[in-house]
């Protein structure tokens, strides 16, 4: 039954499946360019707004200065209206404006404009350079107001100042304006420059960022090339490390370490396969050879029984090897969790000794428990007995007849240590680190003739790791070997 979430996921995957894929270099350049473009757009807009504000502040300051000069010429204090006569000197009257109309049309509107209107909006007087033009007035404005308007097709900045009587009622309005043509041209040029330069800068930035990103991810391309070229034949190949100790250096070093582990695992599995096939092939070849000899001609009953018993022993040996191989494969599964519990170490030791005493008795080997007070440890009971059993059986196999094996426990700080010591042939010091490897045998005295395969200690090490039990070995040639198990605190 299809769930609603599955349908939504299918739609999402279908939608993105047909979109063109983008390389990491292009994605890095694209994202960086988009972020930079957004930031540049914000900065450019802020610059334009700031410049625009500064320009208008400059014009407003100039207008305030012109209003002050006009009031000074008209002998007006503040904004108190004292009659229209005092403002007659504003650059001539309307008649004078008409008289100089021809000159005003030829002259560019490049100076300040002054205009006086009454409360009804009628122009009383204005500066001669206004000619036939008049400044915009809005009686609805209260107080001093600054705004933009158009005079003679040119944009101007103007201020409207109300002239009030003694009762605070506006009797007239003084309007002063200055042209903004030059400033607006500068602002327009600045805006055009930014609009034209913006896409050019973004394009150049994308190209440069793409080139820098390509150079930066070059070690990643080397990782890809190395990984693609690696096979089981050239597992020793590694990625060249970058000069800079940055994240890419760490990535390359980490992948090289991964390759080291893969190569080591491959070599171990290769050696394991070869050793396992050899160990299985030997009993099969012996059984096959024996049966081929038996069928060549009739034999007496005793000979048949002897050869069949030999074949059964070889088959039993092969079955034990397969069981141990399966056990190793089972315990190497990382998902397996041991059943950790608090157990008495003395109980586990006595249980293992009771099972192996008949084997030790055949070689006249005595097993003694020394200094084994009752101690509680945290371990899996079945796994612990298997570990002790493998170590003790090895000690019995490689100890001479009539010798002894000592088992003891002791406290070291808060940890309990169990030791198993034999007096056998011992292990050379240079070979101690290999005794836990699968199918490893020290020398001819530890060959398959003893019935071992070199897997027992490998199982012990794996079980110890699963239970977080420390294991160590010390030995002297022709003196004996001691295995120690260090248990975590219970």
Image (cartoon, grey):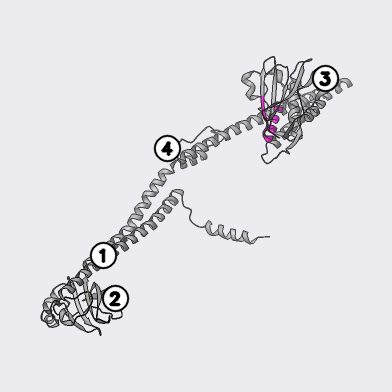
Q: Quadrant of the N terminus?
A: bottom right
Query: Is 321 in front, or is 333?
Result: 333
Q: Which quadrant of the figure has residue 408?
A: top right
| Label 2 packing within 10 angstroms: few (<14), some (14-19), many (20+) | few
**Mark 3, mark 1: which one is toward the viewer?**
1
Mark 2 or 3, nearer chain start: 2
Q: Mark 4 touching mark 1, by CB under 8 A? A: no
Residue at 14%, 80% in the rendered image: 88
Query: Is 374 in front, or is 388?
Result: 374
Point out residue 486 in the picture as x, y percentages from the top left corner: 68, 29
Point out residue 414 in the picture as x, y percentages from the top left corner: 68, 30
Residue corresponding to mark 4:
244
Cα–Cα gap, marks 4 and 2: 68 Å
Mark 3 or 1, nearer chain start: 1
Residue corresponding to mark 1:
55
**Mark 2, mark 1: which one is toward the viewer?**
2
């Amino acid at each position: 039954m299809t769930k609603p979430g599955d349908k939504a996921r299918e739609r999402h995957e279908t939608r993105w499946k047909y979109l063109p894929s983008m390389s990491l270099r292009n994605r890095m350049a694209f994202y960086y360019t988009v972020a930079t473009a957004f930031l540049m757009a914000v900065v450019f807009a802020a610059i334009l707004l700031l410049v625009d504000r500064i320009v208008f502040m400059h014009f407003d300051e100039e207008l305030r200065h012109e209003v002050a000069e006009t009031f000074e010429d008209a002998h007006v204090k503040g904004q108190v209206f004292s009659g229209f006569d005092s403002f007659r000197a504003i650059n001539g009257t309307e008649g004078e404006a008409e008289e100089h109309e021809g000159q005003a049309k030829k002259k560019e509107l490049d100076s300040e404009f002054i205009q006086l209107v009454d409360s009804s909006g009628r122009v009383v007087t204005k500066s001669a350079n206004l000619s036939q033009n008049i400044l915009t007035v809005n009686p609805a404005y209260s107080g001093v107001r600054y705004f933009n308007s158009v005079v003679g097709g040119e944009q101007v900045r103007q201020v409207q100042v109300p002239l009030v009587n003694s009762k605070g009622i506006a009797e007239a309005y003084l309007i002063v304006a200055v042209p903004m043509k030059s400033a607006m041209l500068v602002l327009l040029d600045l805006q055009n420059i930014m609009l034209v330069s913006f896409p050019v800068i973004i394009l150049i930035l994308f190209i440069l960022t793409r080139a820098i990103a390509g150079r930066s991810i070059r070690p990643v391309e080397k990782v890809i090339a190395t990984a693609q070229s690696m096979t089981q034949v050239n597992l020793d190949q590694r990625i060249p490390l970058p000069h800079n100790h940055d994240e890419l250096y760490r990535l390359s070093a980490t992948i090289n370490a991964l390759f080291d582990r893969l190569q080591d695992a491959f070599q171990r599995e290769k050696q394991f396969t070869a050793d396992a096939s050899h160990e299985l092939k030997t009993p099969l070849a012996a059984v096959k050879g024996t049966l081929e000899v038996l069928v060549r001609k009739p034999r007496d009953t005793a000979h048949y029984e002897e050869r069949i018993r030999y074949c059964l022993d070889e088959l039993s040996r092969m079955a034990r090897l397969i069981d141990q191989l399966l056990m190793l494969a089972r315990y190497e599964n990382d998902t397996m969790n041991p059943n950790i519990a608090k157990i008495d170490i003395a109980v586990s030791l006595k249980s293992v000794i009771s099972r192996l005493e008949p084997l030790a008795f055949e070689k006249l080997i005595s097993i003694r428990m020394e200094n084994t007070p009752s101690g509680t440890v945290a371990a899996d009971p079945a796994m612990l007995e298997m570990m002790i059993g493998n170590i003790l059986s090895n000690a019995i196999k490689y100890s001479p007849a009539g010798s002894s094996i000592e088992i003891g426990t002791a406290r070291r700080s808060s940890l309990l240590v169990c030791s198993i010591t034999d007096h056998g042939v011992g292990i050379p010091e240079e070979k101690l680190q290999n005794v836990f490897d699968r199918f490893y045998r020290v020398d001819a005295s530890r060959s398959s003739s003893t019935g071992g395969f070199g897997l027992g200690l490998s199982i012990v090490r794996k079980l110890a790791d699963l239970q977080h039990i420390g294991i160590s070995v010390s030995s002297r040639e022709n003196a004996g070997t001691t295995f120690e198990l260090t248990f975590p605190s219970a």
